[in-house]
Amino acid sequence: MLMIAIIALGSCLNSSHNLEPIERVQYQMGTYGRVLIYGGNNADVDAAFAKIKELDNLLSDYNPDSEISEINKMAGVKAVKVDPQVIQVLETAKSVASETDGVFDPTIGALTIGVYRFGRESDVEPNISDIDKAKSLVNYKDLIIEGHKVYLKNKGMMIDLGGIGKGYAVEQAVRVLKERGVPSGIVSLSGDLNVFGDQVEIAIKNPESEEAIAIFTSKSEDLAISTSGSYERSVNIDGDVYHHLIVPESGRPGSEFLSLTVVIEDTSTLADAYATALFIMGKDKALEFLNRHNGIGVFIVFPDYSMYYNDTFISLVSNLNIEEVKSK
């Protein structure tokens, strides 16, 4: 189970709704998903979880029958016709890859799946000596999208949407709820959370305990929040621990942050992708990127437990309370 990186502590704060909440938690996409709505019914919650499950069946590289797994199997062989939703998330992933000069790369699977084997229980042990070969197979420009077909140019290439898929699923579940007339609520999957129609009190988890390191209230009525952390998923190889946020250039995990939370309006897909990309960039490149993209709010926890948050973060939240934590 992945640790919950961000938590909606309370219900929607606008008491004028006077609507009964419906809340449900399910195990989805390898973690615990939560749907909390006001002004809807159980069928609306069912529809939101059904959308998440549908997308997991399309996007998961853990599922050998998913469309992403089929694309990976056919790498260097032929194009695969896929669902329009797969096209949508891959096009967004390629766009963020271009925007970040390949720091975020949906073809990172040659490393995360092929070398490190995150989340895979098998007799095949991770082999760090394969990093150089795997790095040569990571290139989003060799992910070809033409119409409804997707093609990986080289054999051995693999798509891994772990850095964007949950955010996309959260966003699409919220879209389903809005289309069904639900006025407000929360959808979350591990480190990805979307608040719509109201404000909510939210906590960012301490990376090394179950306590909150920061608490704030969402100011916008449509806010997307995503946290990437080095504690979320890891493997032990010959006594060394490697976490899942891999830098394509080096083939090794990023090491300059404990956690990084992105807050932006509306789109959980981009919040997820930006949180992944910024974490991998490291401090200097991340701050430079943020200076050029002033719509992204960020809250960063460094290994010594010092913290940084930018003006955009402050503009999107209220009632920020930071807990004092001693470095470990």
Image: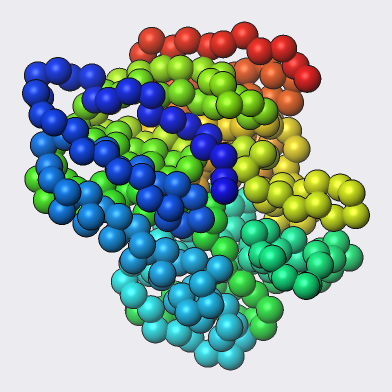
Q: Looking at this view, name the residue that lies furthest to the bottom.
A: 77
Residue 211 visible to the viewer: yes
Above or below, 221 against 244 in this view is above
Query: Where does residue 166 sit, x and y in percent of width and height?
Result: 44, 52
Residue 279 visible to the viewer: no
Query: Where does residue 135 sit, x and y in percent of width and height?
Result: 75, 65
Query: Where does residue 119 sit, x and y in percent of width and height?
Result: 64, 59
Residue at horizontal 51 percent and vertical 18 percent from the top: 214
Residue at horizontal 63 percent and vertical 26 percent from the top: 209
Which quarter of the figure has residue 41?
top left
Above or below, 325 against 172 in this view is above
Residue at horizontal 72 percent and vertical 70 percent from the top: 122
Above or below, 255 against 76 in this view is above
Q: Nearer the viewer, residue 211 or 234?
A: 211
Which quadrant would the C terminus be assigned to in this image?
A: top right
Above or below, 211 against 95 in this view is above
Q: Tell how many labels.
A: 0
Q: Nearer the viewer, residue 175 or 146?
A: 175
Q: Nearer the viewer, residue 252 or 288?
A: 252
Residue at horizontal 34 percent and vertical 75 percent from the top: 83
Looking at the image, residue 208 sits to the left or right of residue 166; the answer is right
Color style of the picture: rainbow
Which quarter of the figure has residue 152?
bottom right
Q: Nearer the viewer, residue 28 or 202?
A: 28
Looking at the image, residue 222 sits to the left or right of residue 243; the answer is left
Query: Where does residue 292 sit, x and y in percent of width and height?
Result: 51, 33
Looking at the image, residue 289 sits to the left or right of residue 89; the answer is right
